[in-house]
Image: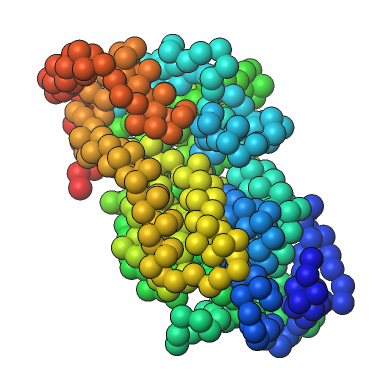
Amino acid sequence: VGTNQKLRWSKVCSQSSSYMGNSLVIAARPSVVRRAARSSSLEMKIRVAVVGGGPAGSCAAETLAQAGVETVIFERKMDNAKPCGGAIPLCMVDEFNLPPEIIDRKVRKMKMISPSNREVDVGRTLKPHEYIGMTRREVLDGYLRDRAISYGAKPINGLVTSIDIPKNDKDPYVIHYADYESSKSGEENSRSMEFDVIIGADGANSRVAKAMDAGDYQYAIAFQERIKIPDDKMKYYEDLAEMYVGDDVSPDFYAWVFPKYDHVGVGTGTVVDRPSIKKYQNAIRERAAAKLAGGKILKIEAHPIPEHPRPRRVVGRMALVGDAAGYVTKCSGEGIYFAAKSGRMCAESLLKITKNGENIPTEKQIKNSYIKDWDRKYWATYKVLDILQSVFYRDNVGREAFVELCEDEYVQKVTFDSYLYKTVTKGSPLEDIKLLFNTAGSFLRANAFAPADVNKF
């Protein structure tokens, strides 16, 4: 570590350090930790703030820290347990070098349950080594964050309260935050630090997004109960996940029962009827009542989930990743992989355009690298899932047809290949034509026995 970096961090570190979990938490002094004057581009690297310590923030911080860039990661709750299905695709395990012990269950079978309670088993096309990983967010997030810290990212357990925007493209941003470690010792906890670049990875209610006027977006409310069920019933969910559709459990999404380490996560979500989320949660518990009988609720969780990318994801030298950017897919509601991937891609872009942190980047450079690369790689994925949701989730007829189609082996193969490996799979033209006719037939049949929609929006 260079002399200048050591001097700067001597200002940041308090006289005592404490551990929270496996993470070293560093408390800053009350005064503003300022950037030293830059006399040459070789004197020091840029300082980057990563706001948010979930998969997006942790993967961004890890990438930057590994390259020797001075990186601070702000997280208000080091043991945060985000309400989330927790499913991750197979490709994420290898791509992000995840150890097997953080994966609670390897799901190789899925059961799709229609509005009329028709059940379709999915997973016949999976190869022996293929699976969907089920995780608890507090375990996954903690592992990724600790790994970033081990590479040199400096953690601060605190809440970012405001951000001062510089008047030109060279002066630093000033982040003001409440330092929770100082609060524990009875000290005044208001702190400030200067940064050249800010990565907003602080979720759907992002304060970074607000500071940069990133624009509003539609969001869903996800509600989940963690339920401890008897061992014989837990055995049923050993490698099985269930997805329920119907306007009783959600007017525009699906409900789930996903297996965890020693319990199941039971939840649902909605964009169009957020005030009624508890009604929909009661409905999924009723639909799955026989399988959950004798269960005990361990934890109740709720959280906003974005529905589409924000209008502005880069403003100045501030960039959004993960949920803060709106990178959750429609139809499947997947966000963990895209959060981690966007954090890494954003950091890699910054390293490239700043020559490993030697230069201060411009808004145009960040947009032309990170945003263009992201949209080029994933625009088609988001668009396809957006179309699927609008076709199949708009009413019970569409949902009934969707579940019937899931019985088709070709549909299962294309769906799982796309999900597990994060690519839009190119199918067979002949099979695609057959699928088109099968879809029409499924809608016709669904009209005959799909229950009437009660919750119309």
382 w.r.t. 432: above or below: below
- Closest to the observer, 239 or 125: 125
Q: Quadrant of the N terminus?
A: bottom right
Residue at x-position 50% and y-position 25%: 241
137 w.r.t. 14: above or below: above
- Closest to the observer, 34 or 298: 34
- Closest to the observer, 4 or 375: 4
Q: Quadrant of residue 256?
A: top left
Residue 168, horizontal then vertical, whole percent: 45, 85
Residue at x-position 33% and y-position 38%: 381
Residue at x-position 46% and y-position 80%: 169
Residue sticking out furthest to the right: 16
55 w.r.t. 392: above or below: below
Residue at x-position 47% and y-position 15%: 126
Residue 236, horizontal then vertical, whole percent: 57, 18
Residue 253, horizontal then vertical, whole percent: 33, 40
In the rendered structure, the answer to whether residue 334 lies left or right of residue 82 reads left
Residue 315, horizontal then vertical, whole percent: 40, 71
In the rendered structure, the answer to whether residue 5 lies left or right of residue 47 reads right
Q: Taking the image as drawn, is residue 13 in sight? A: no
Q: How is the image coloured?
A: rainbow
In the rendered structure, the answer to whether residue 400 lies left or right of residue 240 reads left
In the rendered structure, the answer to whether residue 33 lies left or right of residue 329 reads right
350 w.r.t. 330: above or below: below
